Image (tube, rainbow, N blue to C red):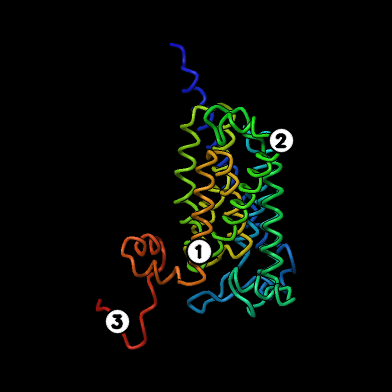
């Protein structure tokens, strides 16, 4: 029995995604083990000074999960099957650039200014904060990755549809700006969720798994295979490091969260059509703006469903002082 072309395309996309996820997982675990032995900055004696932080419980955790995620996901993207040279280059740039800039803020950042608005306000006063360097740097990195990524022109029903080929240079430039903003905005948004164990990774999975399923189901030839691989690589790396995160032994930090968001943002630009990309960018911008006014942690804690998802796999909250211990 002959295999229908669409079925064959979906099978190829699923196989490529599976390989990409495995590569991401193996590379991230290998990088984490290597960095625990030899940190990327500092040595065995100074590792705690650079890479240890105090979490929400007041307990020490390592930030090395972040560089391990970024390095593993970038390495896997460079090796994953089904990606064109341009797609590989875009993934490497998005993951490595956002990871390095996030690590810079992790290691040398200050708390004098907080949030997107705080850093840009300080920059307007002439104060260049580490956060402002990261925000601007990730913006440039996202734009460059979007420019490197393969064009959507001529892809029937694909990420921008056949109309893109007729819009000319101005239309392509506008799409690149939208894609770059989505990549950079996703990088920043993922970091806003990295305030409790496993939260940023869970948010990444909630966004990435439907995107992966849609990429595999799409009958668009090489485009669907590339979108599936671009999505699967960071998801595989994130899942591999999730036990360390949930166990409160390590955290993504800016390096890992920024890289996770940027890579998923890039995958979204590869799969979504233009209206969907604009809608995704609007959602990212709205959530980022909302974070300046409200606490995501309080919103999550106040919603039974979100709180249950947030606590899934985590240690139980520490009892308040004076709370009697359960019997038995």
- The quarter in which the N terminus is drawn is top left
The residue that appears at 54% across and 32% down in the rendered structure is: 158
Question: How far is mark 2 from mark 3, CA to CA?
Answer: 59 Å
> In front here: 93 or 37?
93
> In front here: 234 or 328?
234
Question: How far is mark 3 from mark 1, CA to CA?
Answer: 31 Å
Q: Secondary structure at mark 2?
A: helix
Q: Where residue 65 is drawn, which disc sits there?
A: none
Residue 91, visible in the rendered structure: no
Question: Mark 2 highlights which residue?
Answer: 85
> In front here: 317 or 184?
184
Question: Mark 3 highlights which residue?
Answer: 325
Q: Secondary structure at mark 3?
A: loop
> In front here: 202 or 292?
292
Residue 271 spot, x, y in % from top left: 54, 38
Residue 61, visible in the rendered structure: yes
The residue that appears at 52% across and 65% down in the rendered structure is: 289
- The quarter in which the C terminus is drawn is bottom left
Which of the marked residues, 2 or 3, is nearer the chain's N terminus?
2
Q: Kindly give the residue lying farthest to the top in the view shown.
A: 1
- Which mark is nearer the camera, 2 or 3? 2
Q: Is residue 125 left or right of residue 294?
A: right
Residue 231 spot, x, y in % from top left: 55, 43
Quarter of the rendering containing residue 186: bottom right
């Amino acid at each position: 029995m002959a295999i229908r072309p669409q079925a064959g395309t979906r099978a190829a996309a699923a196989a490529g995604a599976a390989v990409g996820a495995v590569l991401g997982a193996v590379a991230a675990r290998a990088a984490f083990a290597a960095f625990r032995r030899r940190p990327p900055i500092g040595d065995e004696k100074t590792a705690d000074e650079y890479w240890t932080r105090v979490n929400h419980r007041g307990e020490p955790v390592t930030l090395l999960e972040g560089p391990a995620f970024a390095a593993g996901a970038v390495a896997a993207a460079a090796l994953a099957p089904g990606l064109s040279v341009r797609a590989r280059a875009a993934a490497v740039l998005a993951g490595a650039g956002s990871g390095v800039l996030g690590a810079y803020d992790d290691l040398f950042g200050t708390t004098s200014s907080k949030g997107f608005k705080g850093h840009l306000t300080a920059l307007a006063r002439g104060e260049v904060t580490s956060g402002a360097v990261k925000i601007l740097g990730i913006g440039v990195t996202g734009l460059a990755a979007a420019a490197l990524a393969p064009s959507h022109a001529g892809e029937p029903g694909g990420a921008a549809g056949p109309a893109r080929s007729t819009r000319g240079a101005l239309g392509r430039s506008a799409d690149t700006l939208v894609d770059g903003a989505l990549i950079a905005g996703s990088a920043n948004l993922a970091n806003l969720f990295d305030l409790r164990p496993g939260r940023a990774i869970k948010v990444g999975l909630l966004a990435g798994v439907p995107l992966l399923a849609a990429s595999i189901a799409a009958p668009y030839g090489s485009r669907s295979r590339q979108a599936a691989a671009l999505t699967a690589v960071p998801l595989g790396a994130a899942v591999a490091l999730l036990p360390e995160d949930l166990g409160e032994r390590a955290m993504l930090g800016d390096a890992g969260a920024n890289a996770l968001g940027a890579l998923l943002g890039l995958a979204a630009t590869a799969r979504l059509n233009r209206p969907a990309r604009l809608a995704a960018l609007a959602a990212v911008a709205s959530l980022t703006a909302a974070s300046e006014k409200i606490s995501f942690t309080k919103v999550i804690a106040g919603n039974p469903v979100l709180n249950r998802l947030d606590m899934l796999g985590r240690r139980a909250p520490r009892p308040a002082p004076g709370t009697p211990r359960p019997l038995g």
